[in-house]
Amino acid sequence: MSRPNILQVRLSDEELEKLKRYAQQKEISAVEVVRDWIKKLK
């Protein structure tokens, strides 16, 4: 699937660490965490 769009997000150090930790626990990338969250939106 082509993904021509880029989303930039500013996070605090704490927010970024939470995202990285969650992704690591799930054994997926931080980008996949965000994409999975977006898929769940209605």
Image (cartoon, grey):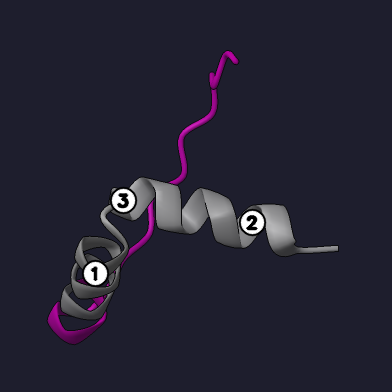
Residue at left offset 76%, top offset 63%: 41
Neighbours of disc 1 within 10 Å: few (<14), some (14-19), many (20+): few
Image check: 25 left or right of 1?
left
Q: CA distance from mark 1 to mark 2?
A: 19 Å
Neighbours of disc 3 within 10 Å: few (<14), some (14-19), many (20+): few
Mark 1 belongs to which amino acid?
Gln
The image shows residue 36 at horizontal and vertical percentages of 56, 54
The image shows residue 27 at horizontal and vertical percentages of 26, 55
The image shows residue 5 at horizontal and vertical percentages of 54, 28
SS at circle 1: helix
Q: Which mark is residue 38?
A: 2
> Quick one: label 3 or label 2, which is nearer the N terminus?
3
Q: CA distance from mark 1 to mark 3?
A: 8 Å
Residue at left offset 53%, top offset 49%: 35
The image shows residue 28 at horizontal and vertical percentages of 31, 50
Residue 11, by quadrant, is bottom left
> Quick one: label 1 or label 2, which is nearer the N terminus?
1
Q: Is residue 37 above or below residue 17?
A: above
Q: Nearer the viewer, residue 11 or 33?
A: 33
**What residue span does the magenta drawing correspond to?**
1-16
Q: Which mark is residue 28?
A: 3
Label pair 1/3, CB-CB below 8 angstroms: no
Q: Is residue 19 magenta?
A: no
SS at circle 3: loop
Neighbours of disc 2 within 10 Å: few (<14), some (14-19), many (20+): few
Q: Main secondary structure of the magenta part?
A: loop
Residue 16, by quadrant, is bottom left
Residue at left offset 60%, top offset 15%: 1
SS at circle 2: helix
